[in-house]
Every structure is written in C-alpha cells, then in structure tokens.
Image: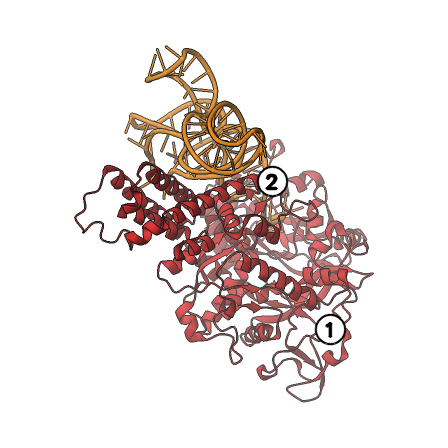
Amino acid sequence: ARFRRMSGLNVMHPMGWDAFGLPAETAAIARGLHPREWTNSNISNMRAQIKKLGTSYDWSREVNTSSPEYYRWTQWLFLLMYRKGLAYKAEATLNWCPLDQTILANEQAEGGVCWRCGTKVERRKVNQWFFRITNYADKLLEGLDRLPGWPERVKTMQRNWIGRSEGATIAFEVEGGVGKIDVFTTRVDTLYGATYLAIAPEHPLLKNIIAGHEEAPLVEAFVASVQDKSEIDRAQLLGRQGVFTGAYAKNPLSGERLPIWVTNYVVAEYGTGAVMGVPAHDQRDFEFARAHELHIRTVVKPAGAKRAPSASKLPSAFVDDGVLVNSGEFSDMSSPEARKAMTEKLVKRGAGTAAINYKLRDWLISRERYWGAPIPMIRCPNDGYVPVPESDLPVLLPDKAPITGTQGSPLEHVPEFMNTTCPKCGGPATREPETMDTFMCSSWYFLRYLSPHDEIEPWSVDDARYWAPVDHYIGGIEHAVLHLMYARFFYEVLREENLVPGDEPFMRLFNQGMVLGENHEKMSKSRGNTVGIDEAVATYGADALRIYEMFAGPPEQDFPWSTTRVAGVTRTLKRIWRLVLTHARALEQTGAAGVGIARDGRVLSVAEKDLRRSVHEKIKNVTEELGDRMHLNTCVSAIMTLLNEVEDFAVKHDDAADSPVFAEALTAMLLLLAPFAPHIAEELWER
RNA sequence: GCCCUGGUGGCGGAAUUGGUAGACGCGCUGGUUUCAGGUACCAGUGGUCGCAAGGCUAUAGGGGUUCGAGUCCCUUCCAGGGCACCA
C-alpha cells in the first residue's frame, strides 16, 4: 500500500474484524465471559499491535462484523437472497449430541463422539436454511478463466470443489412396479457391463424395494448399522460392505436382470444416490463384486488389443476409454462414440438423458449458536415463514441468553427475542432462533469498507463503481475454496442486482505464508514457540521486525522465525542510520539530490557512473518486484546491496558529499526504504 | 488413491524469458579496535586438487532435448498442503 501511494495511486487499505463465530463463543464460555466482551477485548489488543507495526491502514473505515451497524446489512443481504429465491429451508443430516441436545460441527464430532461430553454422536435430520449456490456452479466455474491474477492452485481447488462432470442419467425399471431407480454415470459406454445396481442406505425407494422380500430384515439391520456414521466414518469402514435387497431391476438397453444391493460406498447426497455396478471398469465396483461374488463382464478393451482380457483374470478394473465389446449394436465403437450413441438411444426410449453433475452442494447457513447474526425471518402459524421488513432491521442479538453450547439454539430460550408479531397478518408469531454462518459476514465485508458508517444503504453504489472490484486481495490459502467461493457467489448475485461493477470481486489474489517456529513447526501457545508482536516490537523495533519478516523469504512461502537473523537486519538499519546522518549536512548543501545531473554538463568519474547505474538498477528492481511478484525479500536485498555500494563510495571518496551522484544515491536509498522501514526512513528524510 | 506445491551451501534464500549457479543476509574462520566479553570494522567462506595462477565438480537420483538446463521433457525418490468411495 505504501509503495502504491508513493507511485501516485489512490489507495484504499482498510482493516476490519470478522468477529462472529463458534471459536469466540467457545472461548467465551470457557472463560465465563460474554462473547461480546471477549471479542471486543481481543480486537482492542490486536488493533494496538497492528498499529505498532506501521501498517498504514485507514482506520476511519474499520468494520466489525459483530456490531449491529454491520450485521444489520448482513441480514439485509439474507433478505435479498430470500427475495431472489436463493434462500430456502430443507432437511440436512447433521451431527447431533443426544446428551447436550445440540448440533455439532464436524470438528466437534471427531471420532464419532461429542468433544464436550464424549457421548456417541448421532446423525439427525434437521430443517435448515440453505443458499442455492449450486444454481451458480457453471458461472463460478467459468469465472475462474477470467482471473489470470489468481494462483493456479487456488483455481484448481475451486474447480475440483465444484466438481463438474458430464454424463447421463439412466433409469432402471425395478421389477414389480415399484418404480425406477435413476443412476448418474460418466461412463454410459460401460452400460452393458453393469451386473448389479448399488444404492445408498438413505435411498428414498429403498423401503418400497424391500417390501415383501424375505431379505428385508437383513437390509434394515445393515442400514441401521451404517446410519449413524458420517460420510467420513463410512469411508473409513474396511472393505466394501453391502447386502442384497432381494429385488431386481432391468437394464434399459440390454434388458438384463440386475440384482439391487444396498452398500456403504454409495453416497446419498451425490448424483442420484444410486450407481450401476460395472465391476470390470470401475475399481470400487470391482472390489465390491469380488467381495460379494458378483458377475464381472468386460465390455471395453484397450484400443490396440485384439480381444478383451478375461474377466476372471483381471487384477483390477480397466478404467480407461477403449473399444466396446459384448455391447450389442454398440460393439466396436470407441468409448466416446458409444457414449454419444447410447445416450441418444436411451433418450429415444425415454430411459435416460444427458446430464451434468456437480460435487458442489448448496450452502447450509443455519447455525444453532448464539454468536452470530440472527436470521431475519419470522414464523407465523398462518403465513409460514415471513421475512422481517427491511425497516425493522437489525434484528438485534439479545444481550442475555443462556450460552452454554448445549440445549440447541440459545436464542430459542429467550422469550423477549422469540415472541413477536407477524409482519403480514399482525398475529402472534415467533422468530427464527438460528444465526447465520460467519462466512456470510465475510462474503461482502470488502464492500462495507466503501461506506462503513452509512445507515441508509450497505454501501454506496457510486463508490463501488469507483473502487470495486478489489484490485489486490491478500489472504491465507485456507480460504481457497470456502470463503473465496462464497464471496464470488455473493458478488455474482450483487452484480445481477446492479449493486457492484465487473463480475468478480477480487482481481488479483495473493496467498501469504505463515511465520513458523524456529524448527519449522506451526506457532501455537501449546507448543510454547510463539513470538508476541508486542514483545518483538519492544525488543527489535517495528522497522527491524518488518524488514526481517520481508527479507526472510518470498511472502507466499512459510518461513521459520530466527532470532539471530533479526539482529542482522538491525545491523543494516544502523548502518543506514549512520551513513545518512554522517552526510546529512553535506546533503543539505548539495540540494535536491540528483536533479540536473544529466543537464548541468558535469563530467562524471568512472566511480560516479558506476554508482549511478547501480542506483537506477535498484530503483528498477524494487519497483518491478513490488508491483509484479511482490517478492519483498529481493527488494530488501537490493536495498542492502545499494547500501554496501554507497558506503563503499563514501569510504573511497573523501569528497563524496560534494557529488550529486552520491546525494542522489542516498536519496533514492531512503525512498526505496520508505515502504519497508517507514519510521526510520521518515525520520532520516526529515533530518 | 487423486490433485496441487516444493526439493539449490552449515541456515533463510537469489538466479523474473533456457545464457557467469550460490546475489543479499545469517552463521562460521582469521584479523583490527578493546584490560576482557560484546559492539563496530576489515578479509575469507559450496565441495575438491593446488603454495599460487588455475583445474575439476556441484542445484534430490537417473535419462533426454539443446551450442548452452537449477530452469524444458520423461522417470524415480522425498517433503508439505488440499480433497477423499463423486459413480
């Protein structure tokens, strides 16, 4: 920011606090404090520390997402989503602690037990608010191609997260008029190789499928055994487990009878919650078939091969594309040709459609927690869910609530909060007791910096047209998918409403690394290897600390803290200090350094020419590095090299101070230093 | 398992487009100053042979492209991170 200002740009460099959330609530409970007290005292400490570092933030734009002045607009944005049909309520399967009577985040339910009381965690269906981010899957995917300023790895992670795959949905008719099981597959070409169907334990048709079959009790027992396990725990179950339902379905092209199995490896939430089992060409199906002695039929051979390998001798599934065999009229087609032809035939028969699937799921924003922005919805016995009128915002978080981390949402137990009237019919109604995911607060905060004190609108659209999108966004890699995906989703929605310019919120993304302990491990209080900012500034000075951190390595990499190296930086700053003050008076006499060197007809010595060339090389280096790669470490080494050369010149020339080249070199050195060591550079400049 | 990063002296790192490998700093060695330690300053510092000039060798390992490779290609190994039965 300092560099860009020195370059003449109008720079907005703001700071704020993403202050709601579970960690603050948990920490406050542990200390017997109100989350607000705990949060605000942390903010005060951190603000004071950051100020000591000379970060040049514009504190007049400071925001705090847990203040009513801020979260009123978070609620406003919820209402906007609701109005656009993007917010809806639906059942979600979540971790539930039966003893604490509360929903648990995944990180609170590790190992299948409640982190607080150790009770076995159950899976429970709960009605929750969602945002339809999946409606924007393709836009979010395509938008990545318009972000050359983003690191490739972040874009890759987002693409994987969205997880678009093209294929077809195929309908398999279940015998006995029970209905159809839809299957999504990317490998329609292997349809003749299907030897069974596998469905998730939660498949909606399961009850009807097993009705009347003697296998029903076994199936029910199996479903019960996996039901309470999360997807992750199920994935850790050894082997491919499953049971036969007793029912059969018909392959829509070959007419073959396929046994229907329930398995632990089919995920209810992805695709249709059912797969066609093609053991010869899918490794998971292969393992399942081997474990349960199901038929394996090869229907694709490698492109050059004369015949397909015999199924009984396969060491593993052949998953590549190839040429079809044993596939009726489609035999001898290549896999891509067959996919096209078979999909067309399925469509003609009304037994399938081309389909696209995504891994991306809708965004669950409900939280059964206190420390968050209340969802601005009212439930009326007559009118159902009714949005809180904008004029009634903010829906204030009540100061007093039983914040224990148990017994569900704390707000539910505060009658003054819960009891209200319906905005539509005026009758008695209750408020939504849930609060919003903190990712909502952080999905738009950069826009609030435009108008941090505005009470009429969340931000000025005119100012947004001037400032937005963010030119340069800096954050940790941990935000690669969630925060950066949600913020992009919000921005796209806001763009549709003409509230923001452009189509992506962050033009350039920079992921900074972490400072590690001396032995390359994460700093943490439990390890006792932290370096406090207050302490470090007191010991080394803010400028030495700044330069040390910037010099330690490229900022996108982690680096291990080293106390002895800070001393080296202090040495450099002392040398600059001495050098400039030794020649301050001489510089004064020389006047504005460097001005007119080229024009005054002066003949420069070889040493002067060398120094001058070097000075301008360094100016170029630092300017390019700061503006392009942000490799602050090489900027610092350029300044150090310049210092060596200027010192050397002064040692070798008693009359150095008379040389305009020397004066120019000192001046340039201080200007180059200014963004890195602003306090010392400013003081020396003044003197 | 898949995906993404990365691997250069004792250490952090530099080499931006294929063009003098090791900039800059730390540390270390020797020296000057000092009663001494520290500070400050000077010189040296990848390995190896040599009194020296200089030679040879070297960017995780192996192979390749090129007049020329730390950089490009193939392959193996190692480390860190992300995702994880995604049909």
Residue A607, x across and y down, in percent? 27, 38
**Residue plotted at (56% across, 71% down):** A86
Q: Amino acid at mark 2?
A: Glu
Q: Is residue A368 visible?
A: no
**Residue plotted at (66% across, 77% down):** A396
Label 1's element? helix
Residue A592, x across and y down, in percent? 29, 55
Q: Is residue A568 visible?
A: yes
Tally of marks: 2
Name the outermost residue toward the bottom. A426
Label 2's element? loop
Residue in front for this viewpoint, A450 or A302: A450
Residue in front for this viewpoint, A314 or A58: A58
Q: Which residue is mark 1?
A: A411
**Residue plotted at (43% across, 65% down):** A503
In what quadrant of the picture does the N terminus of chain A appear?
Answer: bottom left
The answer to whether A370 is drawn above or below residue A211 in the figure is: below
Q: Tell us which disc is closer to us: 2 or 1.
A: 2
Q: Which residue is mark 2?
A: A518
Residue A169, x across and y down, in percent? 55, 56
Tell which circle, 2 or 1, labels the residue nearer the N-terminal end.
1
Chain identifier, orange in the render: B
Chain identifier, red in the render: A
Badge 2 sits on which subunit? A
Q: Amino acid at mark 1?
A: Leu
The answer to which image quadrant residue A518 occupies is: top right
Say yes or no: labels 2 and 1 on the same chain. yes
Q: Residues within 10 Å of mark 1 (few under 14, many from 20)?
A: many
In what quadrant of the picture does the C terminus of chain A appear?
Answer: bottom left
Residue A201, x across and y down, in percent? 71, 54
Left or right of A29? Residue A608 is left
